[in-house]
Amino acid sequence: MSKPQIATQPISLQPYTRKAQDHNVPPLKNGERLTRAEFERRFDAMPELKKAELIKGIVYMGSPVRQKHHSRPHTHAIGWLVNYAAATSGTDTGDNGSARVDDENMPQPDAMLSLLPDYGGQSHIDEDDYLAGLPELVIEVSGSTSRHDLTHKKDVYEQNGVREYLIWHTEKQALDWFRLEDNAYVKIEPDADGIIESSVFPGLRLNVAALLAGDMATVLAELQRGIASPAHAAFVEQLAQRKQQLTTDN
Protein backbone atom coordinates (compact mmCIF):
# COMPACT_ATOMS: atom_id res chain seq x y z
CA MET A 1 0.00 0.00 0.00
CA SER A 2 1.36 3.42 -0.92
CA LYS A 3 1.98 5.88 1.87
CA PRO A 4 -0.95 8.28 2.31
CA GLN A 5 -0.26 11.92 1.54
CA ILE A 6 -1.45 14.78 3.68
CA ALA A 7 -4.53 16.51 2.31
CA THR A 8 -4.52 20.27 2.37
CA GLN A 9 -7.08 22.95 1.77
CA PRO A 10 -6.68 25.23 -1.26
CA ILE A 11 -4.52 28.25 -0.48
CA SER A 12 -4.95 31.53 -2.32
CA LEU A 13 -1.89 32.78 -4.17
CA GLN A 14 -2.68 36.29 -2.99
CA PRO A 15 -1.00 36.80 0.42
CA TYR A 16 -3.10 38.19 3.25
CA THR A 17 -1.80 41.54 4.47
CA ARG A 18 -2.89 43.11 7.73
CA LYS A 19 -3.97 46.70 7.61
CA ALA A 20 -1.52 49.48 8.34
CA GLN A 21 -1.71 50.76 11.88
CA ASP A 22 -4.66 53.11 12.38
CA HIS A 23 -3.91 55.52 15.21
CA ASN A 24 -7.61 56.43 15.39
CA VAL A 25 -8.43 52.91 16.61
CA PRO A 26 -7.80 52.35 20.35
CA PRO A 27 -5.10 49.74 21.04
CA LEU A 28 -5.87 46.43 22.67
CA LYS A 29 -5.25 46.37 26.40
CA ASN A 30 -4.74 43.30 28.53
CA GLY A 31 -7.78 42.54 30.66
CA GLU A 32 -10.29 44.79 28.92
CA ARG A 33 -13.71 43.43 27.94
CA LEU A 34 -14.68 43.52 24.24
CA THR A 35 -16.91 41.86 21.68
CA ARG A 36 -15.14 39.70 19.13
CA ALA A 37 -15.89 42.21 16.35
CA GLU A 38 -14.25 45.05 18.31
CA PHE A 39 -11.36 42.77 19.30
CA GLU A 40 -10.71 41.97 15.63
CA ARG A 41 -10.96 45.66 14.65
CA ARG A 42 -8.33 46.66 17.20
CA PHE A 43 -6.11 43.65 16.51
CA ASP A 44 -6.06 44.42 12.78
CA ALA A 45 -5.06 48.01 13.58
CA MET A 46 -1.97 46.75 15.45
CA PRO A 47 0.13 44.95 12.78
CA GLU A 48 3.11 44.71 15.16
CA LEU A 49 1.10 42.56 17.59
CA LYS A 50 1.56 38.79 17.09
CA LYS A 51 -0.30 37.20 19.99
CA ALA A 52 -3.65 38.24 21.46
CA GLU A 53 -6.74 36.26 22.43
CA LEU A 54 -10.31 36.96 23.43
CA ILE A 55 -11.53 34.46 26.04
CA LYS A 56 -14.99 34.88 27.55
CA GLY A 57 -14.99 38.48 26.33
CA ILE A 58 -11.68 39.39 28.01
CA VAL A 59 -8.49 40.32 26.15
CA TYR A 60 -5.31 38.36 26.92
CA MET A 61 -2.07 39.73 25.46
CA GLY A 62 0.97 37.62 24.70
CA SER A 63 4.14 38.09 26.74
CA PRO A 64 7.76 37.65 25.56
CA VAL A 65 8.40 34.00 24.67
CA ARG A 66 11.10 32.10 26.58
CA GLN A 67 13.12 29.36 24.92
CA LYS A 68 13.06 26.45 27.41
CA HIS A 69 9.57 27.09 28.77
CA HIS A 70 7.78 27.79 25.53
CA SER A 71 9.61 28.06 22.21
CA ARG A 72 11.34 24.66 22.27
CA PRO A 73 8.38 22.70 23.73
CA HIS A 74 6.09 24.43 21.23
CA THR A 75 8.29 23.22 18.37
CA HIS A 76 8.27 19.68 19.75
CA ALA A 77 4.47 19.64 19.99
CA ILE A 78 4.14 20.86 16.41
CA GLY A 79 6.67 18.30 15.17
CA TRP A 80 4.71 15.48 16.80
CA LEU A 81 1.48 16.59 15.12
CA VAL A 82 3.05 17.30 11.71
CA ASN A 83 4.56 13.82 11.55
CA TYR A 84 1.14 12.31 12.26
CA ALA A 85 -0.66 14.51 9.73
CA ALA A 86 1.90 13.66 7.03
CA ALA A 87 0.85 10.01 7.29
CA THR A 88 -2.88 10.62 7.68
CA SER A 89 -4.82 11.93 4.68
CA GLY A 90 -7.68 14.18 5.69
CA THR A 91 -5.96 15.83 8.64
CA ASP A 92 -4.38 19.25 9.01
CA THR A 93 -2.21 21.05 11.57
CA GLY A 94 -2.04 24.63 12.79
CA ASP A 95 0.31 26.79 14.85
CA ASN A 96 -0.94 29.91 16.68
CA GLY A 97 -3.91 30.36 14.38
CA SER A 98 -6.78 32.55 15.61
CA ALA A 99 -10.17 30.82 15.71
CA ARG A 100 -13.50 32.62 15.42
CA VAL A 101 -15.72 30.83 17.92
CA ASP A 102 -18.52 33.18 18.96
CA ASP A 103 -19.08 36.81 19.95
CA GLU A 104 -16.95 36.47 23.11
CA ASN A 105 -14.19 34.11 22.07
CA MET A 106 -11.29 34.18 19.63
CA PRO A 107 -8.54 31.95 21.06
CA GLN A 108 -5.16 31.43 19.44
CA PRO A 109 -4.13 27.83 20.30
CA ASP A 110 -0.45 26.97 20.33
CA ALA A 111 -0.92 23.81 18.25
CA MET A 112 -3.88 22.12 16.59
CA LEU A 113 -4.78 18.92 14.77
CA SER A 114 -8.01 18.82 12.84
CA LEU A 115 -10.01 16.88 10.32
CA LEU A 116 -10.45 18.75 7.06
CA PRO A 117 -14.05 19.72 6.19
CA ASP A 118 -14.14 17.30 3.24
CA TYR A 119 -13.47 14.49 5.71
CA GLY A 120 -16.10 15.50 8.24
CA GLY A 121 -14.11 18.02 10.26
CA GLN A 122 -15.86 20.44 12.61
CA SER A 123 -13.92 23.57 11.58
CA HIS A 124 -12.91 25.28 8.34
CA ILE A 125 -10.90 28.23 7.06
CA ASP A 126 -13.18 31.18 6.33
CA GLU A 127 -12.98 33.91 3.68
CA ASP A 128 -10.71 36.03 5.91
CA ASP A 129 -8.21 33.15 6.42
CA TYR A 130 -9.26 32.63 10.05
CA LEU A 131 -10.30 29.30 11.48
CA ALA A 132 -14.09 29.17 11.86
CA GLY A 133 -14.94 26.95 14.79
CA LEU A 134 -12.43 24.88 16.73
CA PRO A 135 -10.45 21.78 15.71
CA GLU A 136 -10.76 18.31 17.15
CA LEU A 137 -7.48 18.47 19.14
CA VAL A 138 -5.74 21.47 20.74
CA ILE A 139 -2.43 21.78 22.58
CA GLU A 140 -1.50 24.70 24.81
CA VAL A 141 2.13 25.06 25.95
CA SER A 142 1.76 26.63 29.38
CA GLY A 143 4.42 28.21 31.51
CA SER A 144 3.12 31.25 33.35
CA THR A 145 -0.33 30.78 31.72
CA SER A 146 -1.11 27.38 33.31
CA ARG A 147 -3.91 28.68 35.55
CA HIS A 148 -5.59 30.48 32.64
CA ASP A 149 -5.28 27.44 30.36
CA LEU A 150 -6.75 25.16 33.04
CA THR A 151 -9.74 27.40 33.78
CA HIS A 152 -11.19 29.94 31.35
CA LYS A 153 -9.65 28.56 28.17
CA LYS A 154 -10.44 24.97 29.16
CA ASP A 155 -14.08 25.98 29.65
CA VAL A 156 -14.23 27.52 26.17
CA TYR A 157 -12.70 24.46 24.51
CA GLU A 158 -14.96 22.11 26.46
CA GLN A 159 -18.14 24.06 25.68
CA ASN A 160 -17.28 24.33 21.98
CA GLY A 161 -16.53 20.70 21.26
CA VAL A 162 -12.72 20.40 21.23
CA ARG A 163 -12.64 16.64 21.64
CA GLU A 164 -9.13 16.39 23.09
CA TYR A 165 -7.22 19.13 24.92
CA LEU A 166 -3.59 18.81 25.99
CA ILE A 167 -1.92 21.26 28.38
CA TRP A 168 1.85 21.01 28.66
CA HIS A 169 2.87 22.67 31.95
CA THR A 170 6.50 23.37 31.11
CA GLU A 171 7.50 24.91 34.45
CA LYS A 172 6.03 21.96 36.40
CA GLN A 173 7.18 19.37 33.83
CA ALA A 174 3.71 17.84 33.62
CA LEU A 175 1.11 17.18 30.94
CA ASP A 176 -2.69 17.06 31.27
CA TRP A 177 -4.63 15.24 28.54
CA PHE A 178 -8.38 15.84 28.60
CA ARG A 179 -10.92 13.93 26.53
CA LEU A 180 -14.49 15.10 25.93
CA GLU A 181 -16.96 12.54 27.24
CA ASP A 182 -20.68 13.35 27.59
CA ASN A 183 -19.89 17.03 26.94
CA ALA A 184 -17.40 17.24 29.83
CA TYR A 185 -13.63 16.84 29.99
CA VAL A 186 -12.19 13.73 31.64
CA LYS A 187 -8.47 13.62 32.42
CA ILE A 188 -6.71 10.68 30.74
CA GLU A 189 -3.75 8.98 32.42
CA PRO A 190 -0.90 7.16 30.62
CA ASP A 191 -1.08 3.37 30.45
CA ALA A 192 1.37 1.03 32.18
CA ASP A 193 3.98 1.82 29.51
CA GLY A 194 3.59 5.58 29.94
CA ILE A 195 1.67 5.98 26.67
CA ILE A 196 -1.52 7.87 25.83
CA GLU A 197 -3.21 7.31 22.48
CA SER A 198 -5.78 9.67 20.99
CA SER A 199 -9.32 8.35 20.71
CA VAL A 200 -10.07 10.86 17.94
CA PHE A 201 -6.93 10.21 15.86
CA PRO A 202 -6.02 6.50 16.09
CA GLY A 203 -2.28 5.97 15.97
CA LEU A 204 -1.49 9.35 17.54
CA ARG A 205 0.51 7.89 20.42
CA LEU A 206 2.50 9.90 22.95
CA ASN A 207 5.25 8.75 25.28
CA VAL A 208 4.56 11.37 27.95
CA ALA A 209 7.80 11.01 29.93
CA ALA A 210 9.89 11.24 26.76
CA LEU A 211 8.11 14.41 25.67
CA LEU A 212 8.63 16.05 29.05
CA ALA A 213 12.32 15.09 28.95
CA GLY A 214 12.78 16.56 25.47
CA ASP A 215 13.58 13.11 24.04
CA MET A 216 12.00 13.61 20.63
CA ALA A 217 13.68 10.53 19.14
CA THR A 218 11.68 8.35 21.54
CA VAL A 219 8.52 10.44 21.05
CA LEU A 220 8.67 10.04 17.27
CA ALA A 221 9.58 6.34 17.49
CA GLU A 222 6.43 5.72 19.55
CA LEU A 223 4.40 7.77 17.10
CA GLN A 224 5.70 5.67 14.21
CA ARG A 225 4.54 2.53 16.02
CA GLY A 226 1.09 4.06 16.19
CA ILE A 227 1.14 5.05 12.51
CA ALA A 228 2.13 1.47 11.59
CA SER A 229 -0.74 -0.02 13.60
CA PRO A 230 -3.86 -1.66 12.11
CA ALA A 231 -5.98 0.93 13.95
CA HIS A 232 -4.31 3.77 12.04
CA ALA A 233 -4.67 1.98 8.70
CA ALA A 234 -8.38 1.43 9.41
CA PHE A 235 -8.77 5.11 10.32
CA VAL A 236 -7.17 6.27 7.05
CA GLU A 237 -9.54 3.99 5.14
CA GLN A 238 -12.50 5.28 7.15
CA LEU A 239 -11.57 8.88 6.34
CA ALA A 240 -11.30 8.05 2.62
CA GLN A 241 -14.76 6.49 2.69
CA ARG A 242 -16.14 9.46 4.62
CA LYS A 243 -14.80 11.89 2.01
CA GLN A 244 -16.29 9.83 -0.81
CA GLN A 245 -19.67 9.76 0.94
CA LEU A 246 -19.63 13.51 1.62
CA THR A 247 -18.67 14.18 -2.02
CA THR A 248 -21.51 11.96 -3.24
CA ASP A 249 -24.04 13.62 -0.93
CA ASN A 250 -23.05 17.08 -2.14
Image (cartoon, rainbow, N blue to C red):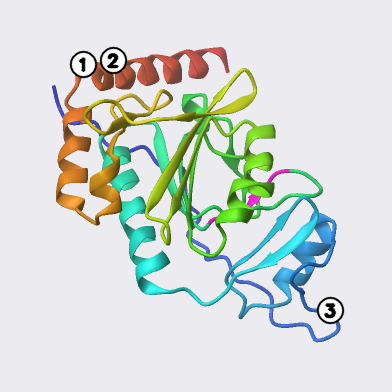
Q: Which residue is mark 2?
A: 234
* Residue under numbered circle 1: 230
Disc 1 on helix, strand or loop?
A: helix
Nearer to me, 65 or 46:
65
Q: Which region is colored magenta?
A: 97-101
Which residue extends farthest bottom? Answer: 23
Identify the residue shown where x is 28% and y is 15%: 234
Q: Nearer the viewer, residue 69 or 117?
A: 69
Magenta span contains residue 12: no
Please state the horizontal and vertical placement of residue 214, each as a whole percent of the image. 24, 57
CA distance for labels 3 and 2: 52 Å
Amino acid on which the number 2 mark rests in the picture: Ala
Instruction: Report which residue position mark 3 lands on.
Output: 26
Disc 1 to disc 2: CB gap under 8 Å: yes
Is 47 in front, or is 156?
156
How far apart marks 1 and 2 lie (CA) works out to: 6 Å
Question: Looking at the image, how many numbered discs can be counted on the residues?
Answer: 3
- Residue 98 can be seen, yes or no: no
- 82 lies above or below 38: above
| Predominant secondary structure, magenta span | loop
x, y percent for residue 138 = 50, 43
User: Three-letter amino acid code at disc 3?
Assistant: Pro
- Dot 3: what SS? loop
Q: Residue at x 43, y 25 (%)?
A: 200
Q: Is residue 196 above or below residue 242?
A: below
- Report the residue at 52% width, 66% height from top: 15
